[in-house]
Every structure is written in structure tokens, then in C-alpha cells.
Amino acid sequence: MHTPTTEARPSIYYPYQVFQPWLASAHPAQDRKKVVVVGAGPAGMVTALELARHGVASVVLSSELQFSQGSRAICFTRRSMEILQQVGVADRMTEGGLPWRFGNSFYRGQRVFRMEAPHDADDRFFPIINVQQQYMEEYLHDACQAHPLIDFRWGNKLEKIDQKDGYAVLEVDTPEGPYALESDWVVAADGGRSGIRSAMNLQMEGASYEGFFVIADIQVDLPLPTERLAFFDPDWNPGNTILMHREPNGIWRVDYQLPAGETPEEALHPDSLKARIDAQLAMIGHAGVAWKMDWSSVYSARTLTLPDFVHGSVIFTGDAAHLLPIFGVRGANTAFQDAQSLGWHLAFVVKGLAGKQLLANHSAERVGAAREIITEAGKSTRFMAPPSPGFRLLRDAVLSLSLSQEFVRPLYHWRTSRPHEYSHSMLNSRDDDNHLFKSGPAHGAPPQNVRLGANDFLLDHLGGGFDLLYFTDAIALPDALQQVIQTARAQGLPLKVTAVGAAQAVNGADQTLPDADGHLRQRYGVPVDDGAKGGAYLLRPDQHICARWLTLDATRLQAALDNALPNHTCRT
Amino acid sequence: MKIPTTMTDKALTIDGLETVYDALATAIDQAGADKAQLFLVKLALLNANALADENLFQQQIAAALQDL
């Protein structure tokens, strides 16, 4: 019998709602499911929402009856917001969030580095926005509840997975006891301590770093802007690093490294927390200011990933698939990219639009992303928390030099999470004009957003399937192209055509963007004036580019679609 | 010790080397026993930046690691 707590979690700022458990006795007998998502964190819910968007039903299991304890992930990147926009929650994130783009590093009371993240006029979203995870989960949960294809089950804890030939049998425990559930696919989104990963005895590759960090959320009134603050080697915590972030609702995140040898239990003792937070506040000039503890936790830095995310019917995603250092806001931000990718890849396989090879592609692309992050985050981690005497000496030498020497200061840069480019994806077209473009997003790159007008951006108009951007000022798409598009749609492929560059609606396009000033074409590297009309971009359902042409013809469009949907058998 | 010929196309004069020798020894003493390492690493980074050649710096690391 699984008995999750029915007592609302304590919080100064977030009113936790305790949901009712889903009980099998209150529902009719269940058929085999297409997809069961285990875990209702950011990765699980975005996967379910993307699946639903592509028409695939799923069951989402949460072992708890409420959202996660404490603020946890608080910094969300522009790409995360673009992904959250696709699943319909970006407006709510924006409403309650604190956007920012500056970071400051301090050593011996001097600001030795200031990061100014660029904010292009063509971007709808800021480089980073701070929102506490409970709110983000609430917004995603509301979106899940609003979707008829998502069956959300609170208080349902996965106990066992038994993989059969082409499906899995799950034992799910609830407050009234266990029930059995069959599913073709199981998404393991059960977090960093994934029980499914342990039960399947899967080994992760990479490194774990020694040393612990405390995260504490405090309610305090500090007259400081929303900027990242990093303090190196302060008097009160010699050799170690402290980070501070403003959160919404009058909360500040304080994140500090523990002296070597101290245990997490010692560090989380209220006296220890109080002394250290008082010392940190004193150091930034606010000695004695009143504050109240909301939540605290301990973490360590790890750079680990499963070498393959797909194991039979089970697909790992988010923290269940990899453990990434907190430096550079890589947990939830990577999970969103994983989930967005998994959503469409899995949906297309479930719907028979592609073979299982598409899932192998998902795994290859996202393992590649995890490895890239591990390489980058490893550098940040070795600077923030030096793993050996040599690394410590170099770090200390850089701190010391940075007071007077400009050239070492870029080493303070914390390499914020950025979307991985699938430059070598097997889905990228092989005979398009990718290499002939002089600018614009290339093969595998995420899309370039473009401001079209007041509160109107290109990405507002894309998503939900493949997108073809076709650059033309003609009155209609060529017949041969229209024929390829119609045939693909008749076979079930969601493919939206957006004509760019015509003053009037273009026949054969679902929508037309006039692009009167040529700015969109310029950002996409498409000539505005000369005869090179009929250029095009093909975007996958996660908006990454998989083909682009200076002049598109029907044969090459067909080839690009075939290539993007491997093992598709019913194509002519 | 053999220094690879690619390692440097310029060299200190004997006088210059002697000046560096004395200056470095004096500075190590000035830094003090507990800060000498830190001082030397800072100096190495400044030299590496002036050298502006990470491959040459790698060669110097290899040379300095010999015969410790």
C-alpha cells in the first residue's frame, strides 16, 4: 500500500494543494496504453503535453499528491520558454517570472567579471527568467488537466516494470493497493534518483565531483536587481563559492559550497544555516537584516549520462537519463529539450509515421546533447569547485590575477545552458543547399526567432508538426510542390506551409507572412531582391532545421521528408 | 635537458637569463613559502598569455615535467 503524505508541504510563498489520488476501483478496466509516463516533473509533463499535441494519449503517474518540495529549478532559459510556449504555458511563466540577463562575479569585494547576455530585438523571451519550480509544475499540470489525451494520476507509485515482447507490464501502487497496467511504451521521467534506472541496473558514464553545496531559499527584502551574483573565496567561507539569485515572491536563493569533510546533515543544521546566511548577508552589506528560511537542500556536482536512452519499451528522459551540474542551469532546461524531442519522436513512432529507428535517432541526438553539456559543464564545475589540488591552485591563481588582469576574466563565464545543434543528425537532408547558405540557422540548429510586429514573433506561428517556410512573392506555390505536400498530409504527416514575402495570401500555403521589410528573409539568409525565389526551410516538430534550399523543387522536398521519417513504410 | 627546436625561436642572452634567475628567486622568497606556489602559477599564466601559443606552452609543460 502506497501512502503518500496528505499534509500540504510547508512554504512561505506557495500554497500547496493536496490532490486526490487516482484509484483503480473508481475506474473501469483498462486496455493496454500507448504510453505511460512515470514521473510528473518538468520532463514528464512536457513529454505528455507534446505527445498529446501530436495526438497520442498517455497516462502520467505521480507518486506524490502535490507539487515538488521547494523551489528547486528556478532559472529558465530562452529556449526553455520557447518550448514552454509550444505547450501553452509561456504566458503564465512570463506573468509571474523575473527576467534577467546580467551576471556578476566578485572576488575580494571587487566585481571582477560582468556577463551581459545578449537580448536580440528578434527574441520574444529574455535569456533567463526566474520562476520557482512549484509554479512551473502548476502551469504544466493545468495544461495537462486541460488536455483530454492526458490521464494524470496522483498518488500512483510505480513498483515494478516487467518488459515483455513489445510492451511492458507495470505494477502501480496506490493508497488502496496495487494495480497492473500494460503499456506499449514507458517514459522513465522519474528524476535523478530514478527507481527504474536502478531496477534495470543501468550504468551511467561520466564523473562525480566531491564536495557538497547547500541551496537555501530565504524570504528577505534586499534592494538588489535580478542579476546573478557569484562570490569567490569570501572571508566567511574561504576557498569556496557562493551564488545568489532573486526569485519571485520576495525570496532569494543562496547557494554555497561546504568546507571539505562537512556532512550534509551538519550543513543543514539550523544553527549552521543561520550562521552562514547571516555571514553572507553581512558580506554584501546587509548585516542583521531580518530573514526567514523557506527551504533548504544539499547537492553535489555530477556529470553522468546513460549512453543510450532507449531500452526496449522503456525510454529515459530528463534527470532519469542524465545527471548534470547545477552550474549553468542545466537540469530542467535540458529536461525540456529532452522532453520536446522525445514527444514528437515517440508520437511519430506510435502513429506509424516512422519506424523505431526514429527513437534511435532521438537517443543519439539527446545523448550527444548530454555529452556536450558534460564537456561544457565540467569546465564550469572545475572552476566553481576544483576537484584536485592542481585545479584549486589554478583557480586561485585566476582569482588573484583577475583583480588586475583582464585576460583571465572570461574564465568566470558560467556557460549557460544552450540548445544543442543536431548538426550531424540522420534526419538532416543529404541533397539540400545547407552548405550554400551564408547565414541563417543551419542543419540541426534551433530556429531563429524573428520579430514580425508588436507582440508578434515567427515562433508564435510555428509548431505542432513539420513546418515548411517557403520564400516567395508569387500568388501560389508551384503545383508540383503542392502535390508532394498533399500526398504527405494524406499519409498522416502534419505539415504546415508558411509562405514568406508575399503581400497577398499565397495559394497552397496555410499562412502568409508578408515580411515587407525583408528582415525575416535576411535572418534566414535568403536573398530578398534577386531571382533566387523559392527558397525554403524545413523545420522538424521540435523546430530544429532539417533541410534548407535556395530553390526548392518537389523532388528534393520529397527526399527531405523521406529522410526525416526513417523506415516509413507506407510512403509511395 | 634537450629543448625541442620548435619550442622557441628567440632565446635569452646569458645576462638576461641571469637577471631572470635572480628576479625569480627573489620573488619566490618575497611571496613566502605558503604563497610561492600560487605566485608561480600566476606567473605561468601571465607567461602563457604573453606567449599566446597553447601548443608551445604544452611543450614547456612537458619539458618542465621531466627529471623532477
Image (tube, rainbow, N blue to C red):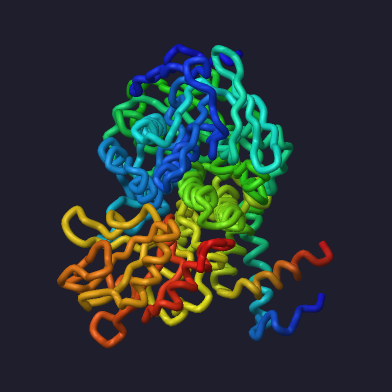
Q: Nearer the viewer, residue A161 or B50?
A: A161
Q: Residue furthest right?
A: B67
Q: Position of residue A69 (x, y in %)?
A: 46, 24
**Residue at position x 33%, y 68% in the image:** A469
Above/below status of A255 relative to A293: below
Above/below status of A72 relative to A338: above
Q: Nearer the viewer, residue A37 or B47?
A: A37
Q: Residue furthest bottom?
A: A531
Q: Is residue A15 left or right of residue A179?
A: left
**Residue at position x 64%, y 51% in the image:** A391
Q: Is residue A308 left or right of residue A243?
A: right
**Residue at position x 63%, y 25% in the image:** A171
Asked which quadrant contains residue A88, the reply is top left
Above/below status of A90 relative to A268: below
Is residue A85 visible in the rendered image? The answer is yes
Q: Position of residue A285 (x, y in %)?
A: 34, 33
Asked which quadrant contains residue B24, the reply is bottom right
Q: Position of residue A182 (x, y in %)?
A: 61, 32
Asked which quadrant contains residue A501, the reply is bottom left
Q: Position of residue A390 (x, y in %)?
A: 67, 52
Quadrant assignment for the N terminus of chain A? top right
Q: Is residue A30 left or right of residue A307?
A: left
